[in-house]
Image: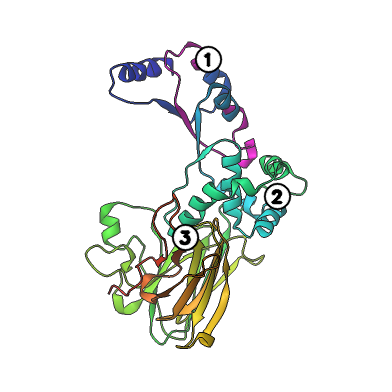
Amino acid sequence: LLVIWRAMEELYAEGITATIGLSHAHDAADFRRLLSVAKVKPSFVQNPIFAVNRWDREIRLICREHGIVYQAYSLNNVANDFVYQTALVLGIARRLDRTPQQVVVAMVKRLGLLPLVGPQDPIKMAHALVAARHLPALLTDADVAALEDVAFARGVDRRGREGHDVRVAVTNRLRWAVFMAWQHPDHSHARTQNGMHGVPVRIEAGQTSAINSKHRHGFYLWDAVEGPEAPLHREGADKRWVKRVRADGFASEEGVNDVVVDERFEVAVVNMGLGDCEVFFVAGKSEGDLKPQGVAQGGGGSLNLWVYDGHTFAVVDTASGTSTRVTLWRSDGDPQLLRVGGGDSLGESHLKPMASFERLN
């Protein structure tokens, strides 16, 4: 380790790199020895963290002692799955009206770490961004202490569901056929061009098809008229409707996930700003035709909607009273993200679905 570090120090001295750091520094004794002889101390340590070792407590405390930035990743690793099912995390999530994943991101920030969260799902990414920015202040000191030791709380089952069998049963209630395929983990260009999935199964209108799978395995469903390649990742063409499903071993004791495909699609409204936003379904042209759907609280609150193609919604900033309307389209995917909230330092105004205000295809 020291030989490698000396070579990196030379690169730093020559101005080839602005900073140098470590990854997977898991041995505290080795880490301290390196720090004792390093000419240039690491600017950062980038480690996966897990609840079962109190979120890498020993290493992160050394980083705090030496002013080193600890970059934490793997919060959503399968080894942490059990955390999001605990009474502690679920209770805090209910109290704050946030997701369990947001609670853990906020805890990581309160521990003084920099969370590295890079999900492919834009909804989870939006949740993580606002949780890191706004939620830490809402956690109490008692919350943080309990979350740090969540893996050792009485009655917590740490076994998770990795490798557990899950039967995914899909019922097609559309008037046309759909394809369903396993999501391939290969993200190469060639695989992306071919839809990033395995051989699809065709599910006719009115039929139910079941697939034996494993916990966390992902699946795509899409309209059969699009052909046997899922159009979500297709380059140079419209990215038509695709539903994303993940097998969940926690969903039922019987290990069965029931999925219904119909003309509705799911939309997650995520508030990226500070003020509350109330969402209304626009049922007609008069003011009385606004049907309240709920409130997405400021600072990362969210609201899940089941909508139909072409439905219009009004989003009202409760502080200013300003209202903006947006029409949602099934072709943009399921579930899809609708970001709301004004332009704080996270960026510009975020009132738009994944494909903007207007239908793009």
Q: Amino acid at mark 2?
A: Asp
Residue 74: x and y in percent read: 51, 43
Q: Which residues are magenta?
A: 34-59
Mark 1 and mark 3: Cα distance apart in space: 42 Å
Q: Residue lying furthest left in this view?
A: 236
Residue at 36 percent of width and 17 percent of height? 9
Q: Is residue 58 magenta?
A: yes
Mark 3 — residue?
A: 123
- Of residue 336 and residue 110, the one placed in the foreground of this image is 110
Write down the quadrant of residue 5 in the picture: top left
User: Mark 1 falls on what kind of element?
Assistant: helix
Q: Quadrant of the C terminus?
A: bottom left
Q: Position of residue 19 (x, y in %)?
A: 37, 26
Q: Is 341 on the left or on the right of 163, as rendered?
A: left
Residue placed at 67% from the left, 40% from the top? 148
For badge 3, the amino acid type reads: Ile
Sequence-first disc among 2 and 3: 3
Q: Answer above or below: position of 283 versus 231.
A: below
Give the position of the N terminus as an image quadrant: top left
Q: Is residue 165 above or below residue 323?
A: above
Colour mapping used in the image: rainbow
Return the residue at label 2. Answer: 157
Horizontally, is 109 left or right of 88 in the view?
Answer: left
User: In terms of image quadrants, where is residue 193?
Assistant: bottom left
Vertical position of residue 129 compared to residue 108: above or below: below
Q: Is residue 40 visible?
A: yes
Q: Which secondary structure lies at badge 2?
A: loop
